[in-house]
Image: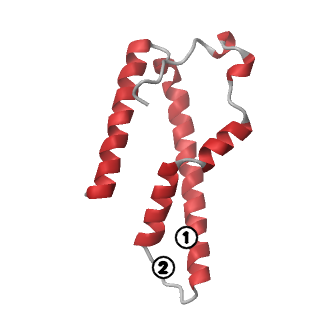
Amino acid sequence: IATAPPLAGPVEEQAVGSAPSFLGGYLLGIANPKAYLAISAVFAGSSLPFADPLLEALAKLAVLSLLIVAIHTVWLLAGVSLSRLLRDPLASRLLNIAFAAILLVTTFWAAFG
C-alpha cells in the first residue's frame, strides 16, 4: 500500500483496458486475508441467543453480509470523493503511507492488544 503509485489522469485519459475486470475484483475479494481474519474474529468472539447453532450461524452470516455491503458502499463513496486528490503524486504518497500505517497499527492491535 505504501509504495502504490498515484492514480493516472482523468478517466478520459486512461486506456479502456486499464480497468480491472469483475472476475479480477471478485477473485481479489475472496482471496483477501484481512477479510477472513475479521470474519473469524467476529464468529469466534460473539454469540447470539439462539438455541440452534445453525440459526446462530445463519444470523451471523446475514449480519456480516449486510455489513460487507455497507462497508464497501462507504469505501466506494470515499474513493470517488478522494479520486481527485489521489491523482496528485505527493498527496497520493502521503495517503498511501497513512493507510499503510493504519493497517499495521490496527493489525497489531487486533493481534496483540
Which mark sits nearer the N-terminus, 1 or 2?
2
Q: Could you tell whether 88 is left or right of 63 in the image?
A: left
**Front position in the image: 84 or 6:** 6
Residue receiving disc 2: 48
Give how far across and how far down residue 6 sits, in percent. Answer: 49, 18
Q: Is residue 3 above or below residue 45?
A: above
Q: Residues within 10 Å of mark 1 (few under 14, many from 20)?
A: some
Name the amino acid, label 1. Lys
Name the amino acid, label 2. Leu
Residue at figure coordinates x 47%, y 50% from the top left: 34
Residue receiving disc 1: 60
* Mark-to-mark CA distance, 1 and 2: 8 Å
Give how far across and how far down residue 76 sits, in percent. Answer: 57, 37
Query: Answer yes or no: do the residues labelled 1 and 2 have beta carbons within 8 Å?
Result: yes
Residue at figure coordinates x 58%, y 87% from the top left: 52
In the rendered image, the quadrant that contains the N terminus is top left
Q: Could you tell whether 47 is left or right of 15 in the image?
A: left
Q: Could you tell whether 96 is left or right of 61 in the image?
A: left
Q: Could you tell whether 2 is left or right of 35 in the image?
A: left
Give how far across and how far down residue 11 sits, in percent. Answer: 65, 16
